[in-house]
Image: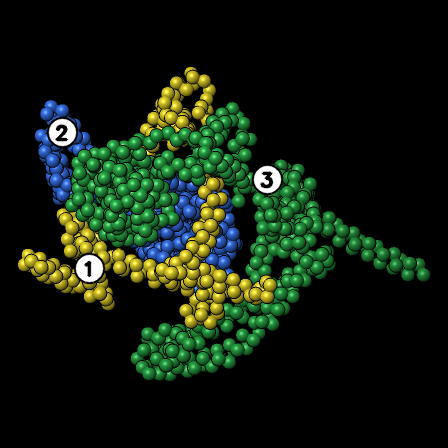
Amino acid sequence: MSRLAVVVFVIICAAFALSWAVRASVTEGDHAMRDAFLVTLSAFMTLAIMSFMYRDNPYYKFAEHLFVGISAAYWMCVGFWSTIVGNLVPRISENLSDFFKVPYSGGGLDFDLFFLAYRYFYMIPIVLGILLLMRLVPKAGWISRWPLAFIVGTFAGLNLIRYLQSDFINQISATFVPLFVEWHGFGDFFGQLSLAADGQFLAMMTNLVIFLGVICGLIYFFFSKEHVGWFGGASRFGIWILMITFGASFGYTVMGRISLLVGRLTFLFRDWLGIIS
Amino acid sequence: MGDLRIIVALFLIGGGLFWLLVRAIRGKEVDRRLIFVFILVSVAAPILFTITFEMKPTLVVQALYDKIENLPAGSKILLAFDFDPPMAPEVQPMADVVTRHVLAKKHKAIFMTLWATGQAQFNITLEEVIRKDFPDAQDGVDYVDLGYKAGNEGVLNVIRTDFKKMFPTDVNTVPWDSLPILKGIRSCSDFDLIISVGGGKPGVKEWVLFVGDPTRVPTAGGVTAVVAPMLYPYYPGQMCGLLGGIKGAAEYENYFRDNHPQYAGMDTPAMVMMGPQTVAHVVILAFIVIGNVLFFVTRRKEVKR
Amino acid sequence: MRHKLKLVLVLVLCAWTTAAAQTDTALGDSVSAAPALPPPLPVTNLQAFDTDNDHGHAITLTWEKSADDGAGENSVLAYEVFRWFPFQVDVVDALRKSVSETRDAVRAFRIDLPRAENALHELSEDPGKLRTIRFNVARPSDSTFELTVDYAIRALEDTIAFMRENAPILKNRTKPLQQDLEKALARLPQAHANYPKDGEWRSLGKALVGSTTYTNTGSKETTADGFFPDYADLYYRVEAVTVDESIRSEAATVGPVQSRGQWFHTGKVPVLGFVLMFFVFTLTFVQMAKKGANLYVRPLSGIEAVDDAIGRATEMGRPILYLLGIGTATDVSTIASFSILGRVAKRVAEYQTSIIVPCYDPIVMAVAQEVVKSSYLDAARADDYKQESVFFVTNYQFAYVAAVNGIMLRERPATNIYMGKFMAESLLLAETGTLAGSIQIAGTDEIAQIPFFIVACDYTLIGEELYAASAYLGREPVLLGSLKAQDWAKVVIMAVALIGMLGTALGWPAFAQMFQVTG
């Protein structure tokens, strides 16, 4: 470790301590020290991640690894408490439900089907879950393919209908748009021509773009015929529509990223430095 | 004094952009770290010196506003807080303003979440909006928080036909049957409107696919900007309104405040965020122009060579 | 005698006069009150039938509006719907409530008893904890009452004793109550069949003026409030009601009707149609591909560029970097990427260039190693294959990006190929590749990342082109057949869209209605 790195490290530690102390002095409440520490830590982690913009450095690496580690642990705990304790335990055992202090919902009438109580059906997902974990054992890894197949099959079956209905059939229905909206002849059309959002012209243009955009976009993704002649022209129009869409998507994404930056800077200026209200 | 600082800041940014343009015309490369500094300044200055702009609502935002506004008082509205802290800067303002609108119109608000972190985000709305602006609103009568349930689309599949099966109690373990607000609700079909606020999976798309389309209950969403373009195809046939990113939230806040003067003093974080957002966008537009100038100048030089 | 007669006559006269006076009074009363409105005409053609396309537990009523709907002084304001409930339903409700309350009490005792014991223990040890004690102690409502430690301890002890005494009693009561409830539920169908004995009509609700339909829906859960029995004879009545609820039409009655669940959902027929269509297309084309039919796939510019890019790398003496993305081996885009990797690796082997394949997922790495190895074998260059050219980096997203960026800046590959599933790291990778001066060819089905690849890479395969590329290169029958099936499905979609547009324009809504899916 070079001398410069040591000096930088000492400066950062001193800055952290100073920030914590100042923050604690202005924070109100019973837990001022704790809140001040958390705000200061959050601010320093933010700055550490942002330091990557200059270049890769050990502080960025530390913040990234800390985030990854805490995320993994957090989601593991959440997964246990929300899925195992939240969804499984209340359905299989009243004693376990009381131990974990969750309301037992496996009650109601003891439903006897083929001499089995209803709640024993939940043993099946427990067994499948254990089989899935066999993936971690090299020799027994093949067993995990069975519950995986069950998961893939179930989700494929559930999603097939939903996606077909919402993303396919309903979207096809949405292209059944009239190209001539409230048409009373060319005279009336040109007489009332305006760019108002609820006007006839824009409504017709919208419908035209939707219809042609869908058809030409599908033509672009048609692989069984070479894109030449009129077919190629339609394909070209389709890719233009796609590019405009991607451009809008890009713009939205940039807006989203800037929003996150605004959020972070607002935190730094307001909650950490206290220079804005 | 504040206006002077804003003007100075904008002049500095404008001057810097002009300097970059001149460099581009001369064919000199621009260090990417300079671009980061520009973005930082263009975002920080409006935050420090508070620039806000008036927003007119777009069609998709207006549609959601009108829907909530025109429902008869006492309508039951399900609000799903399906987001986490990384998305909160964009999505929390829209969650807050929609909640405020729902309660201001005396509708019954039923909150739930499919994300583990959603409950904490709802608590922010509870403290900052419900308890502050609606102190008379009673838990269990005017609003209720059903909490988080793990299972993603599995939860949606169940509550589509039997809500109580997934949420036998509210988040405070009060039994379903003891909550007056939930009387008459058996499934999602019994709601008058479903609004999902979020930006990941499960999110608005899953609500439309698994609940909105099968039950034909009007469904709306508030999403992050990254996800918004992928949801526009669902409007207006499958969704009755959409708030896309911080812009959508700002439009809604502005429109709500203008039409509900009693809330003229409410916090408008989205509108405040649109100030730096707008300046940053203008700077990025300038970069695109400068980048294209540099591209053409460089290409001409190569051709000459 | 004459006097007695006169007396009788007078008495009779008096009695008659009194009666007449009362009558006159009654007449006077009726004259002073407004004449009563006639009741509205009843609904006609009342029918009840099982609600279609559901799991049962719902009946739909339809009727023709009353003639006085929206007309005249006795205009109908609403239609009130009644159903005949046997008194057995009340028995079931009472038992259900008892079961529920007993169970809730047992559960509450189980949770609250240890809590109370803990609170008592804490308070006994440290009376100073009175203010922070977590188990709430009930206290008198007198505002001057001050909670003392002694009172709190006594209250807790009483509560604990009560719970200990009653918890087992309640627990023992639960099962017999449940059995009684089951028996009561089993008697419901017979009770319904006893109509009109041992029951009464109860209002279900009202339908607004102008309505001609009402659906009575209930729960299928036997333990739920509002349980609606299937296969039980149900009777309904509809009355037209005016502003004055006492003025209503005669009741129209209908029944018996039974509810039941359906096996086939007719509202989802369009979905079935499209599933069958895809099924037939896919099977047909896969069979054709397996039989060796020449199924044409148009050339893709991104794939055409791969050969040129590999040639460029050979000339420059620099390696080729191939990234499979951050998906798992089960992701469709990763599977498609394996086909392309095979083709690239074969060309690389033929030209004797080097290839670098850093992997995000260990299983993907294992598969990629096999793919590259077999490509080298196919090119008869088995000796040139180096196992370390395909290696695992890390399965943390941005750590992976950092490592790959480092490889790009050190090794300076001539060509970067990104094929698979990418998320936020897409632009980071593509930017660094541009800095390193590489030709970049990308393909992903992540719509949000496609714009980034388009701006930063030289060639991009958009969405389905990635799958088409794998079919084009690999020529596997299943891939090829699926691709052709999708193409034909697109033809059907375009035709349907065109017909639908024309139908909407020419006023033919029936076609659009064919695509309405319910439920």
Looking at the picture, which amino acid does disc 2 mark?
Thr
Image location (x, y in percent) of residue C219: 57, 55
Q: Residues within 10 Å of mark 2 (few under 14, many from 20)?
A: some
Looking at the picture, which amino acid does disc 1 mark?
Leu
Residue found at the far right of this picture = C1
Query: What residue is shown with label 1?
Result: A41
Q: Label 3 near label 1: C-beta < 8 Å? A: no
Residue C423 against residue A229 in the figure, above or below:
below
| Chain seen in blue | B
| Chain seen in yellow | A
- How far is the residue under mark 3 from the one under mark 2? 74 Å
Query: What residue is shown with label 3?
Result: C210
Residue A88 against residue C493 in the figure, above or below:
below
Q: Nearer the viewer, residue C332 or C341?
A: C341
Q: Residues within 10 Å of mark 1 (few under 14, many from 20)?
A: some
**The disc numbered 3 marks a residue on which chain?**
C
For the image, the number of numbered tags is 3
Determine whether, in the image, residue B273 is placed left or right of residue C483.
left
Image location (x, y in percent) of residue C187: 68, 62
Q: Secondary structure at mark 3?
A: loop
Determine whether, in the image, residue C162 is placed left or right of residue B47.
right
Determine whether, in the image, residue C53 is placed left or right of residue A247.
right
Q: Residues within 10 Å of mark 3 (few under 14, many from 20)?
A: some
Image location (x, y in percent) of residue B145: 41, 57
**The disc numbered 1 marks a residue on which chain?**
A
* Picture quadrant where residue A185 is located: top left
Query: What residue is shown with label 2?
Result: B298
Please tell me which residue is depicted at 85% across the width and 56% down the height of the picture: C12
